[in-house]
Amino acid sequence: MKQEFKSVGFRKMVVPSDVMNVTQILKSTGYFKPYEIDVAIELIEERLKNGEGCGYLFYFLEIEGRTVAYGCYGEIPCTVKNYDLYWLAVDGNLRGKGLGTLLLAKIESEIKSHSGRGIYIETSNKEQYTSTIAFYQNCNYRQIAVFEDFYDLNDNKAVFYKKL
């Protein structure tokens, strides 16, 4: 069910408080293990330290000044304008309200504005991720590969792609 919010904004600039914001967002979803959250935070810290040159680009979605969702993406080295979407997460209390769709559309538009040709996304295909997979499919991504036992035994990696 989609909901109208009084003040929805987007920003690309990474600020130090995003370390805490993203940690809270990822914990609230119930999807990510502590070591996965650590990796997400490392990417933010890398960006804060080295700027855009590090290759990690971000979009944050804010409601009434509070960061409630974020995406991390970047151009894939050794490709011609293909991108990876590394992370996309919405605060667990706000899932299902259309915010992920808004954020993903913003990221896709940004990638298109830099002549991006396509976006690759990977996720687990365990039952817990059924809603994640449905979300990407509803946003016109198609599954193009499965890597068996990738993350762990019986935890396959599913790869999705969308041509822009």
Image (cartoon, helix red, strand yellow):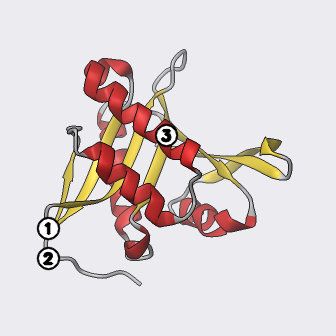
- SS under mark 3: helix
Q: Secondary structure at mark 1?
A: loop
Q: CA distance from mark 1 to mark 2?
A: 7 Å
Residue 61 rendering spot, x and y as whole percentages = 27, 57
Marks 1 and 3 sit apart, C-alpha to C-alpha, by: 27 Å
Question: Is residue 131 positioned above or below 53 on the image?
Answer: below
N-terminal of the two: label 1 or label 2? 2
Task: Say which residue appears at 21% left-offset and 77% top-offset.
Answer: 5
Circle 1/circle 3 CB separation < 8 Å: no
Tag 1: amino acid: Glu
Q: Which residue is mark 2?
A: 6
Residue drawn at the location 44% of the way across and 76% of the way down? 96
Camera-near label (1 vs 3) is 3
How many badges with numbers are in the image? 3
Where residue 52 sits, quadrant-wise, is top left
Residue at image mark 3: 38
